[in-house]
Image: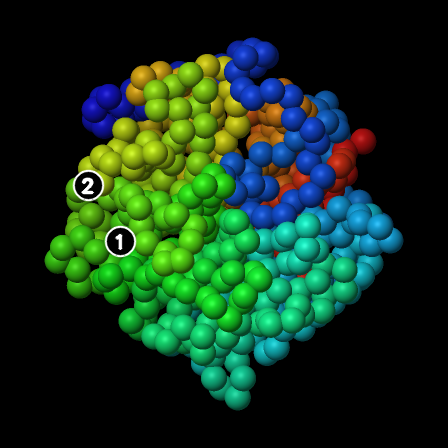
Amino acid sequence: MPALFTALLLLAACGAASAGPPDAAVPADAGPGDAGPTLEVLQHHNSGTREGLYVAPAFTRAAAAGLHRDPAFAAAVSGNVYAQPLFIAAAGTTPGAVVVATESNEVSALDAATGAVHWRRSLGAAAPLSQLPCGNIDPLGVTGTPVADPASRTIYLDAMTSVGGTLRHLVFALSLDDGSTRPGWPVDVAATLPGFDAAVQNQRGALALVGGTLFIPYGGHFGDCGAYHGVIVGVPTAAPQSAFLWQTRAQGGAIWGPSGLSTDGASLFAATGNTSGASTWADGEAVLRFPPSSPLLPADQFHPTNWLALDSGDVDLGGSGALLVHLEGATPADLAVALGKDGKVYLLDRGRLGGAGGQILAAAVSRGEIITAPAAYAAADGKNLVFHGAPVGPCTGDLTALHLSAAAPPVASFAWCASQNGAGSPIVTTTDGRSEPLVWAVGSEGDNRLRAFDGETGAVVFPGGGAAEAMGQVRRFQSPIVAGNRLYVAGDGRVYAFVVP
């Protein structure tokens, strides 16, 4: 379907959907089979696809309406929190824990029921803003969401450190049981990989673990200073000193979206930002697919034909990462989705990204830039894609849901929109993998309230609670996590636990 026609379809659908369609049950064949409850949260948005979907039988619409903050959960941490926390299930004598890393380079494992500290580890002095060439995080420590391996009981993360004024990116492997550093770690990226300049490279996107190799994305600091590149570092977990990297040919091209790198288990996907000084396309403004092995080289790529204009306007494609979606009944069924600072959604064939202008669909879906980690969930005749962004047309709010219909090729239309009152990245809960979908989002750097919306209509289910549910500062792009009958939100200096009746 031509992009212009699709954009008009989206605009027209917005007016009809802004009030929300009638409540209707999702048909039994609208998604995958029943799934078991989420027991652990080991990476950003709960899976390598970055769909942000949680199976939580306790989170019915009725129960969600009665959500409240647990006043007995006391979980103080040191520092501001940009990285999404993880949830580690109990193992042997080790109880379940929420693991959170801060910009002060503190990592804590907190009792999932009480918030008590199981262990706490300092990774070294974080970098003060005064030592950075530019930026907007002060101090700068752990920003990208870690990834955990339950088999080896290990959590992996990148910490920006300042040692005697020298800035270093150190990649750590810590025991989930006591926080100790695994032998052979940390990896000093600049010392291991010549040409990597730790001072100008920032680590903001989520890490991924594929086939025994840890992958870490890098970009630049806020302000785009210095000769940074979009970089992916691969670290074999069994031989960490044999790390390898790929970087964009042109300067810039940051891999900086909060969802970082995504994977379907067979390939690695990255979305890059604007490049600087490129007269021919050189890896920026793109979605790239990599075999997850050394040497790390793209096997396929997509970039818009107007990439140079996107470069010039700093409206790059890298603000959301690549979301991987399986759309049952569609042709193609396996999609990669990118949301750009240009306010557009790009649907791509995951098996053949299409090169220059090879998208299945490109359409304007936001009146402003899109910088978020989107989520996806089953809906009637397809899936819904939800993200923080101001919808095109008569819809109002800052949370938008698009419907992807199972067609050949897939078709997009607006499903609903709502107001989350801030810049948090949404997640979705269902009771069995598809039933009673609820979209959860925090008004990060807005009113800092947690809200829930009916995933079928956009109607408010949990409006934020009262005085007891108030939270302090929650940083932009932050995503909640869910385990059992609890939902956790990480804010500056504290982790909050919400429970359903």
Query: Considering only vertical position in the picture, is 194 above or below 136?
Result: below
The residue under the point 46% across, 66% down is 243
The residue nearer to you, when weighing 368 against 215, is: 215
Residue visible at 57% across and 62% down in the picture: 238
Q: Position of residue 38 (x, y in %)?
A: 68, 36
Residue type beneath disc 2: Ala
| Color theme of the render | rainbow
x and y percent of residue 199 in the render?
A: 41, 76
Find disc 1 in the rendering and name its residue.
284
For image coordinates 56% across by 61% down, the residue present is: 237
Amino acid type, label 1: Gly
Q: Dividing the picture into quarters, in which one does residue 412 lie? A: top left
* Residue carrying label 2: 356
The answer to whether residue 155 is visible is: yes
Q: Secondary structure at mark 1?
A: loop
Badge 1 local density, few (<14 within 10 Å), some, or many (20+)?
many
* Discs 1, 2 touching: Cβ within 8 Å: no
For the N terminus, which image quadrant? top left
- Viewer-proximal residue, 383 or 289? 289
Vertical placement of 27 versus 357: above or below? above
Which residue is at the far left?
279
Q: Is residue 424 left or right of residue 273?
A: right
Give the x, y percent position of residue 370: 38, 44
